[in-house]
Image (cartoon, coloured by chain):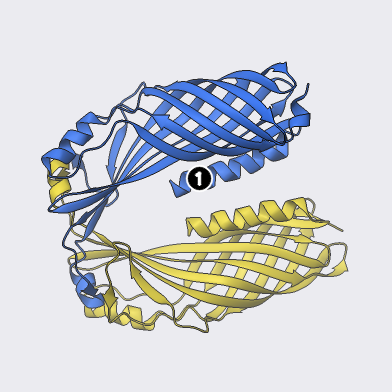
Chain colours: A blue, B yellow
Amino acid sequence: MKKAVFIVVLLSLAVGITADEISFSGFVLSYMMPDLSDLSNDFSSAGLSTIDDEIVTFGYGSWGGFKNVVFGLWGYGREGKYDGPDASTRMFYSGIYAEPGYFLNIYKGFGVMPGVSIGASKIKLKLRESNLGDTDFDDLLAEPTRTSKVKYRTFTVAPTLTINIPIEFLILSLRGGYQWSPFQGNWKLKDGANLVNPPDINISGPFASVCLMFGDVAKINF
Amino acid sequence: MKKAVVIAVLLVSTVAFASARGYGGFILSYMMPNLDELSTEFTDQGLDPLEDELITFGGGGWGGTNVMVGGWGFGGTRTTDGDSVSVKLAFGGGFFEPGYFINIYRGFGIMPSVGIGGTSVSMELRPRLGDVEFDSLLINPGRTSKVHYNTFTVAPSLTIIIPIEFMALQLKGGYMWSPFSGGWELEDGAEIWNTPDVEPSGIYAQAGILFGGGD
């Protein structure tokens, strides 16, 4: 998730440099509904707490452009902890998107923007045994079997509709859309070995976001 | 290392907005940290010893007039194998670097500077592993470990800038000094005892291809 946020901040800087007509950026709070039921069943079978399909995520985004054509970048992420008798798992659910859109100015910066987000969604699991104790450096070199990391990544397209409401120097954005992952994603073990029989994940699902943006409202008074 | 490079790129972006002279680009470094004690631990466990001489890759950027402000980062990895365990060691760092550019002739000049930042050593340890079922991984996730060492570092240096059209060749030499002993941390949150001392202090030399310019 940190990596996604870094990339979004970097790309946002790039957008800020290239798009001087209008630009606004800020925080994105999203309500998402990915289908994680297969993964949740595996968690449950292993004695871990189950995963809620409704996830509130936090993120950052930046949009800018000339006249009505707008290009944006946004990302989101959320971490959850799932404990069981044998192991404990931290799950990071995140995504990062490029979003071209078209801003229809209705009145002094108040307007709607249909767009299409194109990017990737990711699930990262950090697993550790529940009863891990402290260790000696020599013992660690001899027997380093303590944790595992697994990643799932898939291409995602998300048509969106955004309503921009300028309030003084802020812009309140209300967004809705649908995340669609047309292809089956890949599971990968960080240690390089193969992961056999991983669960199916379907990131596809509707989402809604509330964004608090900072930008020069005067610039979008077309 | 990735984090250090990202920080360096961010600093480059910041610098790019506020400079009459600005450079940013890629850096190749030759470094000589003292990893003797860590290397001894490795050989005790049947792993190959570590070399003290490392080639690292990174990026950086500097901007200003005569007073220059910049940042740079570096990182390099080395994999060491033993009979039962393999260790991937990453050596990296990131620095904020103010300096003073002395223009000798049309952008050719020298810049004494002081880097202030941190260096890190991280190790990913992995025994010989087979494939695994997802279900059994959830119950028995003990496969690998990751451990980090971080320390504060100061790096005085002297840079020669040779402008070539819209690029510049950077030649730099300096010394990394870590006055305090750093700390080892296990990524899984447990404590780690009897850790070896790592001494990142040592001389380094760099060659960089930078983009940008100034009079």
Left or right of A73, for residue A22:
right
Q: Residue at x 21, y 52 (%)?
A: A88
Q: Position of residue A184 (x, y in %)?
A: 30, 26
Q: Position of residue B41 (x, y in %)?
A: 28, 79
Q: Is residue A197 visible?
A: no
Left or right of B142, for residue B56:
right
User: Badge 1, how many Cα within 10 Å: few under 14, some, many 20+?
Assistant: many
Q: Quadrant of the C terminus of chain A?
A: top right
Q: Position of residue A105 (x, y in %)?
A: 70, 17
Q: Residue at x 61, y 73 (%)?
A: B116
Residue closest to the eye, A17 or A31: A31
Residue closest to the eye, A79 or B78: A79
In the rendered view, would you say B45 is above or below A149?
below
Left or right of A204, for residue B214:
right
Residue closest to the eye, B35 or A212: A212
Q: Amino acid at mark 1?
A: Val
Q: Residue at x 83, y 67 (%)?
A: B66
Q: Which residue is mark 1?
A: A5
